[in-house]
Amino acid sequence: MSEMQQPFQVQPRQAIGKITLMLIVLNVGLFAWQIVSGVNISDPSIRDALLWGADYAPLTFLEEPFRLFSSMFFHFGLMHLGFNMWALYVFGNVAEESFGKFYYLGLYLLAGLMGSLLSGYIDIRNSYELLQSFDQSLIPRVSAGASGAVMGLGGALTLLSLFPPTPQQRYILDKKSLLTILAINLAFGFFTSGINNAAHIGGMIMGAILALLWYLTQRHQNNTLLKMLILIIAAAITYVIYLYLQYLIQPLTPLWKDAVIQIKSQLNLGGVSKSMLKQSRLNFDKIEKCE
């Protein structure tokens, strides 16, 4: 690792970008607020994670879709936050300078949302299998973190590294280093338990697509409206994917309603009557979390 070339070179060096700084301050500020409120600094409980907006597919798709967004700003402990904020600082500063503030922010948020949606799709697929054989490993997990959005930035910069630099591009992107970083992160997710690799892959795909479209706009002089149109279309496509997932869960609604009842009852989240609990056909021994 000591001989690996830096993923990007720039001249001259400048202060951290405003949007990157805002995102880091927002994530760190929310984490500090959570700790002051009593959340465990190193290993937050699933109950606290859900109270602060983490994603749990049955709850998210049946009752609280805002969790697709809010889960990007909750982290499972100081190490989880620190790793994501370091990656956001490294990738974000370069991405903000390369894409511009508005496009960079849109790319970050859409990558995070796409990561949440792909994670939801995996939970839907697993739940269909759960109907056939009650395998505890197929039960939806609680997930959170900025890694899907951050991987979107990594995917975007890696995509740019495959093409000749634009005349306005200040950073020289090293293709080999960026591909290596992405490969290591994806491999780590595949071979390590407790990692939501679907969110990583979803964010990376969205980031790469938006970077490719941005690169194509650089041939036009007045491309501001074109870039805005790209983000609007990407947001619309993201919403269509969400509607498609809502269609997929229709046969799962009874199962997922039971899952919501179970988790609310187990974690004392409220909104569950004794009659509802008696009607529930599920009995989950343990609901796991993933980052």
Image (spheres, rainbow, N blue to C red):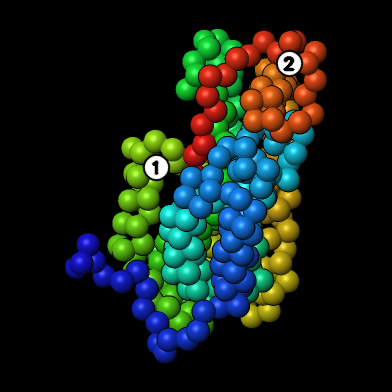
Look at discs 2 and 1 and give the one toward the viewer.
2
- The extreme left residue here reads 3
The secondary element bearing badge 2 is classed as: helix
Residue placed most toward the observer, 223 or 151: 151
* Disc 2 crowd, CA 10 A, few/some/many (<14, 14-19, 20+): some
Viewer can see residue 91: no
Question: Could you say which disc has been placed on residue 95 in the image?
Answer: none
The secondary element bearing badge 1 is classed as: helix
Residue placed most toward the observer, 85 or 250: 85
Looking at the image, which residue is at 43% across and 58% down?
Answer: 83
Residue identified by numbered label 1? 189
Of pointers 2 and 1, the one earlier in the residue sequence: 1
Residue identified by numbered label 2? 277
Residue 265 location (% of width, % of height): 69, 24
Residue type beneath disc 1? Gly
Viewer can see residue 1: yes
Is 52 situated left or right of 284 in this image?
A: right
Instruction: Please say if 276 is above or below 58.
Output: above
Residue type beneath disc 2? Leu
Instruction: Please say if 43 is above or below 16.
Output: above
Residue 252 location (% of width, % of height): 68, 19
Instruction: Please say if 188 is above or below 267.
Output: below
Looking at the image, which residue is at 52% across and 24% down?
Answer: 286
Looking at the image, which residue is at 66% across and 71% down?
Answer: 102
* Disc 1 crowd, CA 10 A, few/some/many (<14, 14-19, 20+): some
Is 205 situated left or right of 164 in this image?
A: right
